[in-house]
Image (cartoon, rainbow, N blue to C red):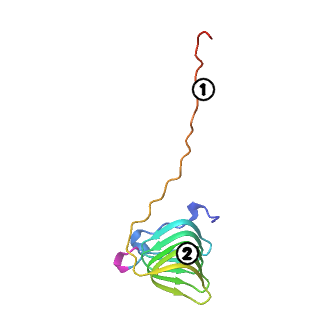
Amino acid sequence: MSTRRPASRLATPTPAAAGNGHNGERNSVVLGPNDRLVGQLFIEGDLRVSGSVDGELEATGDIEITGRVNGSVTAYNRLVVGSAGSLIGSDVRVARLTVEDGATFSGKVTMGKPTAKEPMPVKPEPVPVAVVITQPEKAKGKRR
């Protein structure tokens, strides 16, 4: 968790400067060694993970793991598990796979070009609902 205040962060670059596919450049996202992701991440481009992930990763480009990933991984191009990396996946779908010496890898691998799909929608959290139960009114009148 960062101790920096949001106002102290650098300004986000404009899309043209971020390399999001303009002029032949591919988008690239990096999860640093102190970053932690819990959930799903879909990237249009390349992804480098040197932090930890508990969840699903999907990238239309390459994925390089030098950190720890526990969950399914889909790389439309290439997946590299570096020598210091750890991937414990339920399902791994890749076009090409490289596992370097010293890396930890566990999971089911499916090879071949994955087809592009829409990102999975985020399921909304259940909302608690208050139910009020009232006692029926007693009938007025004579008792028999």
Q: Marks 1/2: CA distance? A: 54 Å
* Label 2: which secondary element: strand
Residue behind mark 2:
89
Question: Residue 75 colored magenta?
Answer: no
Could you say which quadrant of the image residue 32 lies in?
Answer: bottom right
Please determine whether, in this image, residue 70 is positioned above or below residue 64. above
Magenta stretch in the rendered image: 20-24
In what quadrant of the picture does the N terminus appear? bottom right
Disc 1 marks a residue whose amino acid type is Gln
Please determine whether, in this image, residue 2 is positioned above or below residue 99. above
Please determine whether, in this image, residue 10 is positioned above or below residue 83. above
User: From this viewpoint, which residue is outermost toward the bottom?
Assistant: 101
Which numbered dot is residue 127? none
* Label 1: which secondary element: loop
Residue behind mark 1:
135
Please state the horizontal and vertical placement of residue 21, each as a whole percent of the image: 37, 75
Please state the horizontal and vertical placement of residue 126, each as a whole percent of the image: 53, 50
Please state the horizontal and vertical placement of residue 117, each as a whole percent of the image: 38, 69
Disc 2 marks a residue whose amino acid type is Gly
Q: Write the residue at 57% across / 33% down.
A: 132
Could you say which quadrant of the image residue 5 lies in?
Answer: bottom right
Secondary structure of the magenta portion, mostly?
helix
